[in-house]
Image: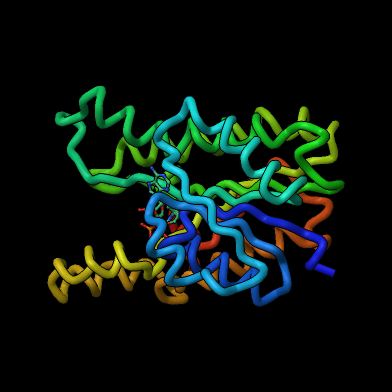
């Protein structure tokens, strides 16, 4: 049944996006995978007859709507997309510069909004389409060095609230998932630089331990399935219990 559904996965060359693309393929979906690194995409997905590789640089925001047209020309109407691509560079508030703002907002926010705009047209989607944007608990709880990143994720969640009703009139659901700390490559690298006391402190924040990419792709797949047909305009926090102790 999922074979009727084509899903676009951004950020599919790494981490949560990569895992999600594999999971959706295993579940029988057709998946269009995208990221900048074509070689990595080919390593993972070339040879899978249900995977379509279409590399994009989503920071080129003027090109995002044209990209959605390219998707249509390549695979026809889609059943949904998940925006996993993101930039997240640590910096202090006093170091914020326009270029840093631009870099984060282009990929994390503008690309997500433009993908939504490009796909929210009758001919671009099948019935009961579902759009999923990956936010972060950073939109809900502060961390040193993450002010711009947090702001981008807050913007995504606001966009979902603001657009869900309008999109419902086209039969489209739009939701966000806000993960806690998930052990992807960049997070593992960051953790290697932290001493054992710091690691203990991080672990203490997670009653059910740190997350694995599959913990997020399970929920992404749920949002593409008919089991979630009554859910729209929501942010689902998936964080192993991190937020239960926050106000
Ligand atoms: N891991 C966590 O702990 C965590 C927690 C909360 C939220 N999240 C969110 O979950 C999502 C995935 O995170 P992750 O840890 O899996 O990240 P990741 O492993 O660093 O993957 C990021 C992906 O984004 C792509 N990307 C970055 N810039 C791009 C651009 N300009 N154009 C196109 N693609 C671009 C990268 O591919 P290329 O380099 O090939 O372009 C890569 O595939 C992000 O939205 C992140 O904010 C992650």
Residue under the image location 77 percent in, 46 percent down: 77
- Does residue 158 appear in the picture of this structure? no
In this picture the colour scheme is rainbow
Asked whether 107 or 52 is in front, the reply is 52
Number of marks: 0
Farthest residue toward the top?
Answer: 98
Asked whether 127 or 231 is in front, the reply is 127
Locate residue 202 relative to residue 246 in the image: left or right.
Answer: left
The part of the image, by quadrant, that contains residue 171 is: top right
Asked whether 241 or 150 is in front, the reply is 150
Percent x, y for residue 40?
Answer: 39, 64
- Does residue 197 appear in the picture of this structure? yes
Locate residue 55 relative to residue 49 in the image: left or right.
Answer: left
Residue under the image location 47 percent in, 76 percent down: 208
The quadrant of the picture showing ligand 1 is bottom left
Locate residue 144 relative to residue 57 in the image: left or right.
Answer: left
Residue under the image location 57 percent in, 55 percent down: 9
Percent x, y for residue 168?
Answer: 81, 36
Residue 34 vs 26, above or below: the answer is above
Percent x, y for residue 151?
Answer: 40, 34
Percent x, y for residue 169?
Answer: 85, 31
Locate residue 8 relative to residue 151 in the image: left or right.
Answer: right
The part of the image, by quadrant, that contains residue 203 is: bottom left
Quadrant containing the N terminus is: bottom right
Asked whether 23 or 230 is in front, the reply is 23
Residue 93 vs 181, above or below: the answer is above
Residue under the image location 23 percent in, 44 percent down: 145
């Amino acid at each position: 049944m999922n074979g009727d559904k084509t899903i676009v996965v951004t950020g599919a060359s790494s981490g949560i996006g990569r895992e999600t693309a594999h999971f959706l393929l295993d579940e029988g979906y057709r998946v269009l995978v995208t990221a900048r690194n074509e070689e990595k995409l080919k390593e993972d997905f070339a040879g899978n007859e249900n995977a379509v590789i279409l590399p994009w640089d989503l920071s080129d925001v003027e090109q995002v709507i044209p990209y959605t047209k390219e998707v249509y020309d390549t695979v026809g109407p889609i059943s949904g997309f998940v925006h996993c691509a993101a930039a997240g560079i640590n910096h202090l508030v006093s170091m914020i510069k326009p270029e840093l703002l631009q870099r984060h907002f282009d990929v994390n926010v503008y690309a997500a909004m433009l993908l939504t705009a490009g796909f929210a047209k009758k001919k671009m989607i099948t019935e009961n389409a579902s759009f999923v944007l990956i936010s972060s608990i950073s939109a809900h709880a502060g961390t040193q060095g993450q002010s711009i990143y947090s702001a981008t994720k807050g913007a995504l969640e606001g966009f979902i609230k603001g657009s869900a009703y309008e999109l419902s009139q086209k039969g489209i659901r739009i939701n966000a998932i806000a993960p806690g700390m998930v052990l992807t490559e960049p997070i593992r690298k960051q953790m290697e630089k932290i001493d054992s006391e710091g690691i203990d402190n991080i672990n203490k924040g997670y009653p059910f331990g740190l997350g694995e990419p599959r913990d997020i792709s399970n929920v992404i797949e749920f949002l593409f399935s008919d089991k979630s047909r009554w859910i729209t305009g929501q942010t689902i926090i998936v964080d192993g219990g991190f937020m239960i102790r926050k106000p």
